[in-house]
Image (cartoon, coloured by chain):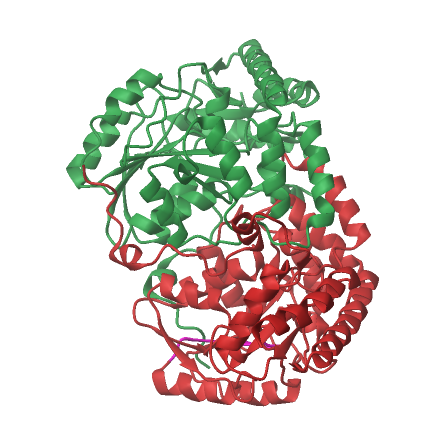
Chain colours: A red, B green
Amino acid sequence: MTGPRYTPLAASLPATVPFVGPEAQERARGRPFAARIGANESGFGPAPSVIDAIAEAASGAWMYGDPENHDLTQALATHHGVAADNIMVGEGIDGLLGYLVRLVVGPGDAVVTSDGAYPTFNYHVAGFDGTLHKVPYRDDHEDLPALLARAAEVDAKLVYFSNPDNPMGTWHCAEAITQAIEGIPEGCVLLLDEAYVELAPEGTAPPLDVANERVIRMRTFSKAHGLAGMRVGYAIGHSELIRAFNKVRNHFGMSRVSQQAALASLVDQSHLQKTIARVAAARERIAGIARANGLTPLPSATNFVTLDCGRDGKFARALLQELISRDVFVRMPFVAPQDRCIRVSCAPEEELAVFEQALPLALASIT
Amino acid sequence: MTGPRYTPLAASLPATVPFVGPEAQERARGRPFAARIGANESGFGPAPSVIDAIAEAASGAWMYGDPENHDLTQALATHHGVAADNIMVGEGIDGLLGYLVRLVVGPGDAVVTSDGAYPTFNYHVAGFDGTLHKVPYRDDHEDLPALLARAAEVDAKLVYFSNPDNPMGTWHCAEAITQAIEGIPEGCVLLLDEAYVELAPEGTAPPLDVANERVIRMRTFSKAHGLAGMRVGYAIGHSELIRAFNKVRNHFGMSRVSQQAALASLVDQSHLQKTIARVAAARERIAGIARANGLTPLPSATNFVTLDCGRDGKFARALLQELISRDVFVRMPFVAPQDRCIRVSCAPEEELAVFEQALPLALASIT
């Protein structure tokens, strides 16, 4: 019996998940984690007003969400001082990345990213048969001039760049980005992933310039807003590129409850400010724990701190396993030399105390 | 300044929405609908237990959903008596349709559907450059033998067939489907969309046969379960085809709150049975209103009733507009001769009373 005839591309793709979730690890381990500080989620949670909004939206869950995401789009446009047609709401940045890649990347088309940057972006590029060119990090920072130079060299249609960066937590100031943007090659789009930007120092995000067809920015409610589980991200860009998402997106893909949660969270700027302060304090706390144990915390503009373990990837991977076996869910960079580090998400004190207790034991067991 | 270089396919696609949402119509009209009975949502709502589960899940919305959808998948597997690797959960049937089309349909690949069946499926086929072949309805029923004959003729890789059907509400018995399935051509997959099947008479769904590589079934929490706004659907099929979704899906695309809502709804079978009874009563009520106004209700195995207006598409479209202008949100089939009908979703009495009042006025204004 002949089964489905997959496309040659689909037949060639591996059936993998870009990240194994903590739940899968808990099932494999047979017990829950005591500290969930590996996925850069926000243990500080959504605002109480957002929790209320979700509960209130529940009885209306029988209705499809507005496929135009009108109310949320309008609110975001007002918030950012752009027009509604410069905003596209979608199922998290992951979903929007997939749509953007699909719009511009076909078989063999060149795409540029940093070696060790966001794997889900790479997954989408592979999924549409693009050719990925990787540029090394420079001193644990993504290197925008080098990315754009490579883009010019390989005639790239798309460049991925996150600021602040994940997994290193490092960042560039707005001026450096603005200057680099001048050099985006013709016919190339710079995807500026700003998932963590609300948590970065003032002056990290360049001013929005939606007249520039060569830049698209992505933001999310998953990090500072504490709504990773609701799947709401958005793109900010030139109206023509924004409109193009309507060619390929899942128009009814947004949960109605998520639309309302995001809207409520956008309104509650005071909770956002509180979270930003809590994240800053947690960064200090994580850095202190690290230093007390001989690890070096990297400066971070995100809701996580990347800890240089001072040795090679093998050592960091061993440490990661020891932490996991001590019920601490953490992750680490995949690629050398960044894989000398582990990455710890900001979280309430209760979970950081678990980390504080586990870290010296984990280190002792491998040194 | 040269903007993005879209793929030739993306450049050729229109930037449209398969359906305009009722919210967009309300914004255009400047006032809300009094009866939302056009999108086959379930005004009977989610179960109270599900509303509680959503509220309870809200404080955990800071966590990403399990990318393996483990708990929901296990529960569905148990419910249907299949293995977990025969189930793929996704962002509504719409999302899963997109993934399936992407897996098998490339440029010029033949796909077969009924002329006037689900437009979102056609949207996905166009989005991956497939060639769509359309088979006419036969007596307001999708015609599975004709669909499969056409599939053999054009060497189709995928056939879409919904049972019960949308937009006509008609259905075939399990035996007819089972018999037709024997004739699926080699290398062809039959996509059996069973979005409404919980609302159909006993004996409408053929037995699940997950050993058959040529059939994939799709189900949803959007209709009988009253959770359209949560975006949860699932596919049931051969483990190899199910596994293939991992090549292209948005692994972290499911809302964690939606996962929990669906799980709670699956558990609450008593509410589901109540909804099924309410839908059956509402079908009778809609049929009665139609007959009292000289329209002919078609037999329905769904949560809507399609009403034959007895004249041509122009007449039905005029009637639809008159109903909309009287604050009744309804839709209608797009294609002749089915477009002689309008389609009314089952709903609580309050909304059907609005329809009952509006219908004679709408008819009077155009006859």
Query: Is any part of residue A258 visible from this angle?
Result: yes
Q: Is residue A66 above or below residue A177?
A: above
Q: Is residue A232 magenta?
A: no
- Number of numbered discs overlaid on the protein picture: 0
Q: Is residue B288 above or below residue B78?
A: above
Q: Is residue A162 magenta?
A: yes
Left or right of A19, for residue B83: left
Q: Is residue A108 above or below residue A336?
A: above
Left or right of B112, for residue B327: right
Q: Position of residue A324 (x, y in %)?
A: 59, 61
Q: Which residues make up the magenta segment? A: A156-165
Left or right of A211, for residue A112: left
Which residue is at the front of the view, A213 or B74? B74
Query: Is any part of residue B31 visible from this angle?
Result: no
Q: Position of residue A231 (x, y in %)?
A: 60, 54
Name the residue located 70 percent from the left edge and 34 percent from the top edge: B51
Q: Position of residue B340 (x, y in %)?
A: 43, 24
Name the residue located 74 percent from the left edge and 65 percent from the top edge: A352
Which residue is at the front of the view, B240 or B156? B240
Question: Quarter-wise, where is residue A220 in the image?
Answer: bottom right
